[in-house]
Image (cartoon, helix red, strand yellow):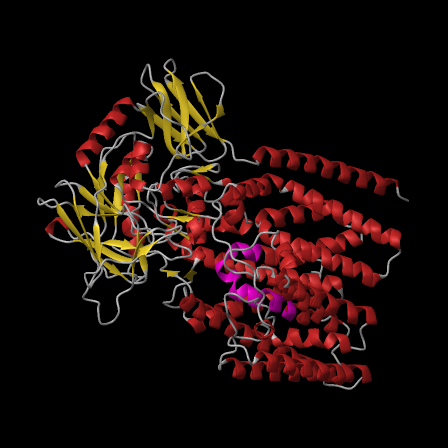
Amino acid sequence: MLRRARPAGPRPTAALLAAAITLTALCAAGVVARTYPFGPRTRSINDLGNQYLPFHAHLWDLLHGRADGGLLVNWQSGFGAGFLPDLGTYLSSPFALLVGVFPRDEIDLAVYVITLLKSACAGAAMAWLLLTLRSGRWWAAGLLGAAYALCGWSVADAAYNPMWLDGLIALPLLCLVGEWTRHDRHRVLGVLVVALAWIANFYTAYMATAAACLVLLLRLLLAGLPRRRALAALGRAGATFVLGIGLAAPLVTVVYFGSTHASPGRFTWFAPVTGEDLLARLLPATYSFGSPAVFVGTTALLLALALPFHRAAPRRVRAGWPLLVLAVTLSMQWQPTHLAWHAFTTPQGSSYRQAFVLCALLVIAAWHTISYGPPDRRALGAAAGLFVLIAAAASGSGLVRPFVWPILLVAVTAALVGLVLLGRAADLRRTGAGRGAVLAGCAAVLLIGAQLGEATATSAVAARLRLGAMDDYAPWGPRQEQQTRAIAHADGWPRYRTDPGREQTVGNDPLMVGGQGAQYYSSHTSDVLSSTLTALGGGWTSGGRSLQSLDNAVTDVIFSVGARVHTPPDPHQNWFPQDGTGVTVSRQDVPPLVTVRPAGTPTSGSAYGPSPYRNQELLLGTRVYTLPRFTLRTGTGQPPARAAGKRPGLRLDAPSARSTALRPTITARCAPGDEVYLWAPHFAGTARLSGAAAHGLTGRFRSDPATKIAAMQRLGTVPATGRLVIDLSPNRPSLIPHGAVGCLDTARLRESADRLTATGATEVTVSDGTLRARLPSGSKGIAVVAAPRTAGWRCATGTAPAVPAENHHGLIAVPLDGSSTSLTCTFHPPGLRLGTTVGAASLLALILWAALTAVRRRRRP
């Protein structure tokens, strides 16, 4: 006999509606803004293109066995970087694994689909939570769930920081865990949900956990439970969250210690936004990078504003939720509590990363209004009055652009009419008159339509305005295809490295197109690597966390770069005039990854001086540069002003419109045939060596006083006369340091490279976090591995026990006694042992807790 299928409950139906509204609005916004994949405009804004897409591409390579390295070490970036901290920061979400089912050249589409799915799941989770907190109309829960998933923080900030969306999902799930602990249900499942939230993205999970604790405390206060029962619920909640975070400890501790060893980056002091800007971000279609994006939709905002006046709701509810919303709002504007929301670390970039917490509380407050029945005319009138005051106060903000008002007018009209119809439908139901269902249906259509329309507009506006305010990068295309083919053809890892090239496409080119280079952009870029490459003349952005390739013959010998790709500047960036016709590859014979230096070589990471040329020689072990005296003249032939302080040198002003033909010049004398290099970290513009000897080389320098320094550039060869002239074209006020010009004796460099090759390792093998080398018999002195000496490296020679590696000017070094012919270095991620211990203890405690719970329930009558 066939059983009739049970109808789906209100929570699954509401969750599906929330997900459908969310997906519809986000796709419609892409169509309106004409962004990828619905139009020609790229979605790869800022760190999405520079960091997150390349890391997802690297995950694809790991899943398909094509990456250089494994879970412990990423050998493609930063000449060898620990990978677990990056995995835990950017790729530990279960959704990230979906990249593996897409083609490699559709990585942009893969991340976009993942973003959509995360947003939809956040809406579904919130709808489920709302119906758990209180019963009510399923479509209203779906509507408010979508309002949460489409909040301003989600479409303006998290849209290009997809790992933050895991926090958007985690918040309602952790609130559900709080509800389970109140009723002593699902103990094991609650611990697992907490662990999954912290594994997926611990940064936003920390904020979501704090929010869930506030919600739980308020729920306990509103429930009016006896003190003993309330304390018992708090105890269960504390145990659940502690055990869940403990299970996530193996990843969380690795991320934490990775941050402690990272380059400090650039931090800014917190400055609260004005009240006008804060209120403006409650309205649809407003956008700015530095203010809290707390838009949740007009319907949700009106309902939240109506709660204090909604007489059908208990007084405790009418007071409790608005007070919590107000307290969290104020905490975002006060520096101590603002820092507390961000784990006591000033965020780089977007300052209000906790704004999704306020959005969630507004939505929950709105649900408490509608779940007690539609607000009456008194409550709705008071809410409308407050809304008018908010709009009037926000009108003075520059964030409210002219197109906001028609969008707001339509949204307010639809929301108010829909809520009035909903109230009328409820009155008809109470009196038993007809047409109540019809009016309720019309109200639902109006409210859902208003939410869809204003969320679509807000998302589309944010997408368009981001393009004008931030750097953007083209999706995968012919340029990346050419780079990938050239690198694959030249690749010889681990015999030598293949650098993707100085003219980068994104900040993590090695992860995106292959190869093994200095380029690396991560929150965990090690301070050792950053300071070492800076001392050698390297360039960086993002305050030292985005390191660039250094096209230099000496550093190529030091780091065993045997092949280098040369690509014209990316036309998508339009930073400089284009030259060159295609991708080329240059090759040179270089020493192996492991070389042997003579006994007595100093092993210190702090011996570098102010000259990158002398620093390169120190690391190479041979004098190969001539540093000539040079003369710098402005475009008018006058000597420039001198600068003192932390950045001594000669000042250059950007040319005016009338003097663009008059360019500053540097003149010096060197040996004919030497290679000419210019080191000017605080110069912005182009430099070119005059005469035919330059071979068309143009040095492109990109610097910014606060966030960027330019890399050393090769400009060509010294002409037969020995006199060199460098034409400078600054595009902003710049600085030329003393000792800026270096002339490289390529013959002496070749002799040094041959000597290091002859005494270096005869064989090198690399597998994930282990490097093995076979050394010539009788090798003495120190073995130097061409990889940064980051925390966690341990090395051993022969059969000796492994000990922490020594530091040779920032590189891994191992003393040799002449008796061993083998070397093994292994990487142990800092914090992994501690995290594993805590995780194992938490798992054991969870098993015991589950067993005790089962025994108690069996004994219970």
Which residue is outermost to the top? 819
Would you say 419 lies left or right of 108 here? right
State whether residue 211 is above or below residue 138.
above
* Residue name at image x 61 percent, y 62 percent: 356
Residue at 24% across, 25% down: 755
Residue 9 appears in the figure:
no
Q: What count of labels does the image hold?
A: 0
Left or right of residue 190: residue 338: left
Q: Is residue 492 above or below residue 679?
A: above
The spot of residue 562 in percent (x, y) is 26, 36
Find the residue positioned furthest to the right.
Answer: 861
Q: Where is residue 639 in the image (x, y as percent from the top left)?
A: 23, 57
Q: Any magenta on residue 111?
A: no
Q: What segment carries the magenta color?
A: 143-166
Q: Can residue 685 be seen in this view?
A: yes
Where residue 523 appears, as percent x and y from the top left, is: 49, 48
Q: Camera-side residue: 216 or 331?
A: 331
- In the rendered image, the quadrant that contains the C terminus is top right
Q: Quadrant of the N terminus?
A: bottom right
Q: Quadrant of residue 855?
A: top right
Q: Where is residue 579 in the image (x, y as percent from the top left)?
A: 20, 57
Instruction: Check if residue 159 falls in the magenta segment.
Output: yes
The residue positioned 61% from the left and 70% from the top of the image is 296
* Prevailing SS of the magenta stretch: helix
Image position of 114 with respect to 452: above or below: above
Front-most of 350 and 706? 706
- Furthest residue toward left: 720
